[in-house]
Image (spheres, rainbow, N blue to C red):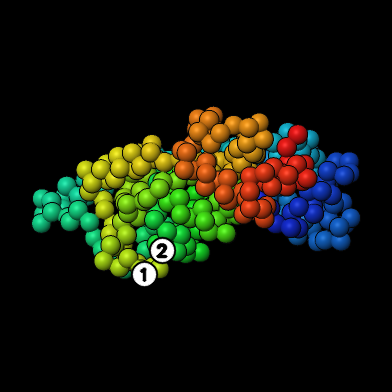
Amino acid sequence: MNGKLSALQLSAQAQVLYRHILRRAPAAIEEHAADLGWTRARAARHLAELEQLRLIHLGEGAVVSADDPRLSLGRLLDDEEAELSARRQGLIDIRLAIETYEADFRQGLQQSGPPAPPWERIPAAEVPAVIERLIRTSDGPILQVTSTLARGPGHLESVKRLRAEAMAAGREQQSVFPLSVLEDTDWRRLAGQRAASGEHQRYLEKVPLDFLVVGFSGVLLADEEEPLVRAPNMLLVQAPNMRRMFIGLFAELWRRADPVHDGGAAAADLRLLELLALGFKDEAIARHVGLGLRTVRRRVSALMDEHGVETRFQLGLAVARRGLLE
């Protein structure tokens, strides 16, 4: 940072000397050296570090004194934070410029040779690296549509970590799943974890295809030639008009889907149980909680399985025994 020494770069011995100066009255450098059992040259070398940062002052007769560290160190921290803010803004400006640079690059390709293909095939082994590049070089939400939990890059540990990091950094993620995954005994736990991390989830009766939209950078589309492969090859779509098409398709699927686990599966289930206890019919419950009728019946069935009962009456008794509802 402009060649200036940072307070965090003080050597350990300079810190020892600084603490010693703070603890005692102003004294000559020879006295400080004697108190610490150092040579004068050694004390002078580390004193120079402190003087460069203006943490100490040298008066007449080489008498060393120090200001209140809340003022001197506070000044240094303010300077460092100002430089960090400027550096951060510079990085933001570069990130925002990436897409315009890419457009210039593609324009150059078109003028110098054949046009770039609208998509390219990505081998399965390279998919995690491509997803990481797309996430780290783009802004905007991450939009996922998946037809099964067992297929696609979403089950890979490296991709799971990337998704968690992106959401922890405030990146929005929306995912559409088929209703059939609700029959998976592990899905409730997994859905709860992902929802708690910030993922917004909705469910469709049938999901037509698998794809992933990463901000405004690209779309990864599962290769339909390999429907049963756990980690299939993917198609990377970067043509702007095709990206917009997939973003529009996701918006329509999201509109049609039900928010069964959208941000709070447990709260949604409690509301459903409350309405059941009040004697509401399934159709009325669906209207009250904003879900489809089939989704409500699936959730009631799942709750019966969860509580180990066979009828709705038994479900009411089990819920009452456990004190889940007031």
Compared with residue 177, is residue 75 higher up or lower down, i.e. above or below?
above
Q: Position of residue 300 (x, y in %)?
A: 58, 45
**Which residue shows up at 49% across the image and 49% down it?**
166
Res 186 quadrant in image: bottom right
Q: Position of residue 296 (x, y in %)?
A: 52, 41
Task: Check contact, mark 1 vs mark 2: CB within 8 A.
Answer: yes
- Residue 8 visible in image: yes
- Residue 138 visible in image: no
Residue 43 shown left or right of residue 237 in the figure: right
What is the crowding at mark 1: few (fewer than 14 residues within 10 Å), some, or many (at least 20)?
Answer: some
Compare marks 1 and 2 and give the one earlier in the sequence. Answer: 2
In the foreground, 77 or 322: 322
**Which residue shows up at 85% across the image and 41% down it?**
26
Q: Position of residue 126 (x, y in %)?
A: 36, 67
**Which residue shows up at 53% across the image and 36% down it?**
282
Q: Position of residue 266 (x, y in %)?
A: 63, 43
- Amino acid bearing label 2: Arg
* Cα distance between the residues tagged 1 and 2: 7 Å
The residue beneath circle 1 is: 229
Quarter holding the C terminus? top right
Residue 2 shown left or right of residue 233 in the figure: right
What is the crowding at mark 2: few (fewer than 14 residues within 10 Å), some, or many (at least 20)?
Answer: some
**Disc 1, SS:** loop
- Amino acid bearing label 1: Val
**Which residue shows up at 33% across the image and 38% down it?**
252
In the foreground, 57 or 250: 250
Q: Which label belongs to residue 151?
A: 2
